[in-house]
Image (cartoon, grey):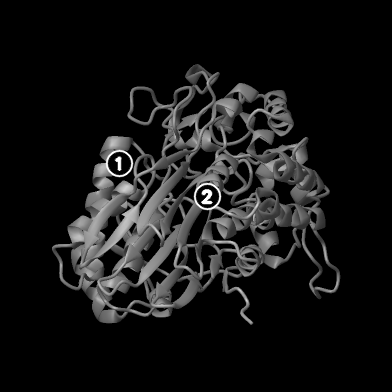
Amino acid sequence: MVASQHRRAAEVGAAVLEAGGDAIDAAVATSFALGVVEPWMSGVAAGGCMVLWRAKEQKAHVVDYGMRSPRALDPADYPLAGEGKAMDLFAWPLVKDDRNVQGATAVAVPGVVAGMALAHERFGRVPWRELVAPAAALAAEGMRADWYSGLLIASAARGLAADPDAAAMFLEDKRWPILGTWTALTEKRLDQRRLAATLEAIARDGPKALYGGDVGAAMAKDVRDKGGCLSLADLSAYRAQLAEPLEVAYRGGRVFAAPGMTGGPALAHALQILTDVNKPSYADYARALEAAWTQRLRQSGDREAPGAPPACTTHFSVVDRQGNLCAVTQTLLSIFGSRVVSPSTGALLNNGIMWFDPEPGKPNSLAPGKRCLGNYCPAIGENADGARFAIGASGGRKIVGTVMQLASFLIDHGMSFEAAFHHPRIDMSGTRPVIADLSMPARELRELEAAFPVRTARRLCFPYAFAVPAGVLREGELNMGCTEVMSPWGDAVAERTT
């Protein structure tokens, strides 16, 4: 079973499972496919993290492939603009010309290809080429444009128009989002042929195509030609890392999360607070999350702008016949990343530099060769009865609270997987008011309002007031999957059985 924010990518992963691949193989194939069908969310220029469970070992592992700042980056090239705060995702002081947000100066060293390669080398069994090839085929066809892609492109059209190569890929006449006709009789597709060639090179030559090879040289040259500082040496030096997960004992079960520069430590902190609460309520969730974010913000300086749009992130989860599970989150950071396309590779580039505080002297201040601080939070959990789940979400700082609540719905409240995904959630990302789902029962809303200032919001397909989760569950020999109920493209796809 593969649960993904895009059904087509989930189908690619499920086909790998049908052909005898394991959960890791399916994750690799799904990852590359998502970079084609959700190019504004992920891709070869993204970063992220994977938490996985190996049934044979009965052990969890973490593959960390977060972004880094280029080694030639000079913080002096990002002067503060004076008064005001940035409002794209983080409430940092404004930088002159938004150099840390948009354009080639915002591009960090990507990690997705290295992360998938490390996971495959350590745990996979299907040949690498066979896992990347489906994504190359999808890119050769081009992503089909529909109303939802048009909506997302329209939301970033002004920024995309500033880069000729991004405008050529996503806009008509360098102004309008590419759309199918209203009758859906005329199909339009993005031109992703250069991306297809890039994926074919990665399929043929492996990760070295990007990290030291011709693809990497071309990408680095494109970035530098557009004013950035990414180099082939940065790519050659990049390494994904294996790490031991954070493990939180919880109600007779366990939750495994990523350590380090992720949302995992905040999730672990919040769950530890909830261990003292029997059958936690929404007010308990808000208290736990507020405490966890207060500590994180004090130590990291990672402050999200109030009312900011959700981050350009995607999540998918996989479970196979043997009970191996993967929870994978990857991101370009902002929607459409830096809004810059590398013309030689066809890749939409990240804006990972925005993760850093441009003000010097802070724990997360901008510096060369430094790891980016992310909020992605893939997790593996199990309840006291031995059922295991792999969950995660997209949505910036909204992610941690969503993962925590889903884990609690399943473990504390004994909900079915489907019920947990449909159940109302809150968002408490360290700043008040708490955002509550308008469909929350009146009694529980009153209890929350007695403890916190609250604003209600509807669950919509755009914009998202809450994070966008995807997950799989294994209960005995039964596998199941769910995605965000309001996601137009999300779906869980099972391998076909004979």
Q: Residues within 10 Å of mark 1 (few under 14, many from 20)?
A: some
Q: Which residue is drawn at 50% across and 71% down?
A: 321
SS at badge 2: strand
**Residue sitting at the far front:** 56
Q: In terms of sequence position, does the residue under pointer 2 or pointer 1 come before the other? A: 1
Q: Which residue is drawn at 43% across and 59% down?
A: 392
Coordinates of residue 127 in the picture (x, y in percent): 66, 51
Question: Dot 1 corresponds to which residue?
Answer: 297
Q: Which of 219 and 24 is in front in this view?
A: 24
Q: Nearer the viewer, mark 2 or mark 1?
A: 2
Q: Nearer the viewer, residue 54 or 340?
A: 54
Compared with residue 39, is residue 424 higher up or lower down, i.e. above or below? below
Q: In this view, does 414 lie to the left or right of 127?
A: left
Numbered label attached to residue 330: 2
Q: Which amino acid does label 2 sit on?
A: Gln
Compared with residue 329, is residue 319 higher up or lower down, i.e. above or below? below
SS at badge 1: helix
